[in-house]
Image (cartoon, rainbow, N blue to C red):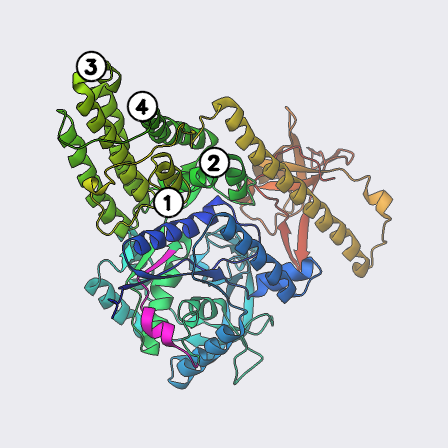
């Protein structure tokens, strides 16, 4: 009977398909793929899960805007994401979609169980909701608050920067507060449950110590989601629905739960730091309430940022993985992403850094080591490795010890998902082997017939080093290891990591007649310009979209004036209005005028302009608007009010007697026209 392999279950978060995934999104999936590959090479029975989170108001609104049904929209987006994972050669064992029938049925069972045992109760929710974040916030959690003249909160922004809206509706609540002490004790008893440690400290200090509030877990204001069986006007809110995927994908709540029994609990949930709270507070409490064991580790990695901050479609500073793979190959792309992200911290992407890492790490260090070794074996030994280890140099022992140390250190780091450090460790061997060439000087040995055996031994040591390197980089780079062993003439050799030893290399091998560089050196200037051009294209596309949306919003406002008893205008008249982006640089009250505020604007011109607006009632402290980017009517005839010159009009919106200045995305530049 064959020995049963140990199991290993690893998951990515399930991705929200509201737009195209960029390299920051792809990092998590590549990282989990590298770990899954590593564990398979270490002899584990691996189950690797990824997928899409397809319910919620945001999806419903997105589909409606595109003139599609929600299911049609998510089908299209899921297909795109699957194609991307195929391009990145992701080896997931399953792709779950929260619209899968088996998942929805299991979520209903989970909800009903929690309801029946008293962990969920019905109440009324009043609070601030962000559609973009699919999350509720208390007033104290808002990053920015808008108030009326009486000090009442009339709006604000979530910590993410997205606008929130006041929601009042009947809702079911999960008794999170009931389990707060239990969770705190669990953290203390399992200090490695959340990694890195800084994330656990954040959960304790920011959420558990201040006190957990009960969590609203249903909505009635939209329909796109899993219905509560006993109360179908309620839709199960995103976090119970989405988080349950990690167990429903294994058959939990179905007639066949054999995979669940085999693989649960998960060994690793890997998520971005922005969703650590949901996975380390809501999810453990849900599992505990269901009587299920918790995952062993939850890793909250940092963001892959740009020099100007977080990579974001709203900023227009996005790089897509397809751009890099199509131009530089899959191995270079995967290597860079895992090398650039230090464990627990943010990584910074720049075109210069990407090109440098390809040139120095891959082309110069690894590529050159392979090229030199293959060329010398062909030149000095007719393409054959004939070393016997009988002849040695003064440097052999150190090279062998380096290889042994690197193998052990690499395995330890990969077990801890510290990919950047693991790759840095492999490159110690790459560097040591390159140095070994300079130390042994094969070109000198080749001139002395008495050194023939020594030369053969040197060539074998180099080939062994490359063989070890090829084995170690397999989880990260799917193609380079195969190319390396092919050029060494040992294709088909076992590259398992379970018992990798320096001297297990085949005694003889036939090397190809001429090796081909596996990582050609890049032209720095040309490739940096290429990557920047792709980023610029994204910025321009985003800018055009934002301007179009601003114009559409302004046109809708003009159209809505019909209902206010105002005379409608023709579109050709409206087109004469010149709308521009401006940034408020100063704001103050107009002396002697209770209603007027004066704003100094950067409108893209050297002198700027001043605009007066009768909105003092709603902005008693006008300084809150300083720095905001707004829309102005730029071609109004200037006029004087209370002795002050007003050179245009500031656009604002009104609802239920409350006025709010219309702001625009930060990536728009003062002076840009809305066309």
How many angstroms separate mark 4 from mark 2 (CA)?
46 Å
Give whichever of discs 4 and 2 has the lower sequence position.
2
Q: Quadrant of residue 401?
A: top left
> Which image quarter is the N terminus in?
bottom left
Q: From the image, tell me which residue sits under label 4.
A: 376
| Nearer mark to the viewer, of 3 and 2 | 3
Q: Quadrant of residue 404?
A: top left
Residue wearing tag 3: 448
**Which residue position holds label 2?**
308
Tell me: 577 left or right of 53: right
Q: CA distance from mark 1 to mark 3?
A: 41 Å
Mark 4 vs mark 2, foreground winner is 4
Give the residues in magenta: 255-270
Is the residue 246 above or below the residue 347 in the image?
below
User: Can residue 420 be seen in the rendering of this structure?
Assistant: no
**In the foreground, 479 or 26:** 479
In three-dimensional space, the C-alpha distance between marks 3 and 2, rounded to whole angstroms, equals: 58 Å
State the residue at coordinates (20%, 16%). 449
Mark 4 crowd level (few <14, some 14–19, many ≥20, 10 Å Cα): some
Element marked by disc 1: loop
Q: CA distance from mark 4 to mark 3?
A: 15 Å
Compare residues 48 and 304 and report the one nearer the observer: 48
**Does residue 486 appear in this view?**
yes
Residue 38 image offset from top left, x and y in percent = 32, 51
Residue 476: mark: 1
Q: Secondary structure at mark 2?
A: loop
In this rendering, the label closer to the viewer, 4 or 3? 3
């Amino acid at each position: 009977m064959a020995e049963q392999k140990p199991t290993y279950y690893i998951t990515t978060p399930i991705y929200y398909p509201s737009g195209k995934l960029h390299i920051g999104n792809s990092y998590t999936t590549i990282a989990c793929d590298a770990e899954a590959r590593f564990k398979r090479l270490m002899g584990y029975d691996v189950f690797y899960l990824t997928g899409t989170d397809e319910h919620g108001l945001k999806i419903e609104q997105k589909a409606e805007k595109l003139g599609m049904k929600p299911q049609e929209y998510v089908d299209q987006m899921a297909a795109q994401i699957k194609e991307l994972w195929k391009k990145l050669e992701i080896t997931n064992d399953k792709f779950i979609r929260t619209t899968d029938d088996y998942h929805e049925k299991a979520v209903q069972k989970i909800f009903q169980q929690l309801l029946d045992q008293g962990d969920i109760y019905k109440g009324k929710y009043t609070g601030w909701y962000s559609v973009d974040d699919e999350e509720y916030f208390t007033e104290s959690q808002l990053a920015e608050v808008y108030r009326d003249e009486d000090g009442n909160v009339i709006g604000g922004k979530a910590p993410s920067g997205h606008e929130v809206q006041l929601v009042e509706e009947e809702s079911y609540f999960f008794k999170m507060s009931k389990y707060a002490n239990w969770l705190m004790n669990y953290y203390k008893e399992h200090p490695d449950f959340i990694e890195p440690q800084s994330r656990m400290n954040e959960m304790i200090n920011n959420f558990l110590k201040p006190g957990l509030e009960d969590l609203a877990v249903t909505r009635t204001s939209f329909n796109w989601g899993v219905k509560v069986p006993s109360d179908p006007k309620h839709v199960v809110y995103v976090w119970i629905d989405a988080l349950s995927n990690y167990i429903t994908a294994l058959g939990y709540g179905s007639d066949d739960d054999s995979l669940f029994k085999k693989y649960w609990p998960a060994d690793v949930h890997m998520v971005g730091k922005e969703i650590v709270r949901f996975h380390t507070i809501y999810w453990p409490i849900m599992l505990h309430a269901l009587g299920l064991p918790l995952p062993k580790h939850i890793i909250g990695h940092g963001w892959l940022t740009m020099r100007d901050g977080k990579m974001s479609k709203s900023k227009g500073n996005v790089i897509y993985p397809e751009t890099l793979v199509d131009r530089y190959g899959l191995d270079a792309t995967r290597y860079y992403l895992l090398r650039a992200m230090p464990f627990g911290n943010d990584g910074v992407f720049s075109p210069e850094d990407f090109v440098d890492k390809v040139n120095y790490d891959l082309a110069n260090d690894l590529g050159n080591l392979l090229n030199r070794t293959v060329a010398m074996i062909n030149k000095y030994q007719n393409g054959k490795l004939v070393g016997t280890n009988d002849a040695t140099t003064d440097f052999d022992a150190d090279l062998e010890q380096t290889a042994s140390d690197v193998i052990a250190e690499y395995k330890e780091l990969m077990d801890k998902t510290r990919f950047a450090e693991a790759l840095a460790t492999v490159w110690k061997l790459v560097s040591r082997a390159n140095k070994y060439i300079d130390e042994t000087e094969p070109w000198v040995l080749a001139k002395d017939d008495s050194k023939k055996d020594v030369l053969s031994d040197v060539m074998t040591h180099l080939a062994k080093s490359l063989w070890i390197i090829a084995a170690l980089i397999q989880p990260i780079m799917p193609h380079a290891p195969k190319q390396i062993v092919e050029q060494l003439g040992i294709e088909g050799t076992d590259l398992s990591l379970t018992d990798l030893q320096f001297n297990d290399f085949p005694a003889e091998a036939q090397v190809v007649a001429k090796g081909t560089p596996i990582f050609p050196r890049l032209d720095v200037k040309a490739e940096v310009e290429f990557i920047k051009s792709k980023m610029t294209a994204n910025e321009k596309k985003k800018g055009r979209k934002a301007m179009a949306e601003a114009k559409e919003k302004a046109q809708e406002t003009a159209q809505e004036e019909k209902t206010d008893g105002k005379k409608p205008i023709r579109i050709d008249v409206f087109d004469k209005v010149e709308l521009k982006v401006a940034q408020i640089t100063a704001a103050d009250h107009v002396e002697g005028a209770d209603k007027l505020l004066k704003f100094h604007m950067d409108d893209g011109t050297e002198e700027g302009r001043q605009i007066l607006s009768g909105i003092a009632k709603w902005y008693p402290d006008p300084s809150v608007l300083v720095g905001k980017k707004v829309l102005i009517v730029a071609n109004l005839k200037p006029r004087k009010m209370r002795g002050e010159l007003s050179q245009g009009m500031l656009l604002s919106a009104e609802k239920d007697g409350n006025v709010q200045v219309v702001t625009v995305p930060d990536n728009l530049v003062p002076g840009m026209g809305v066309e």
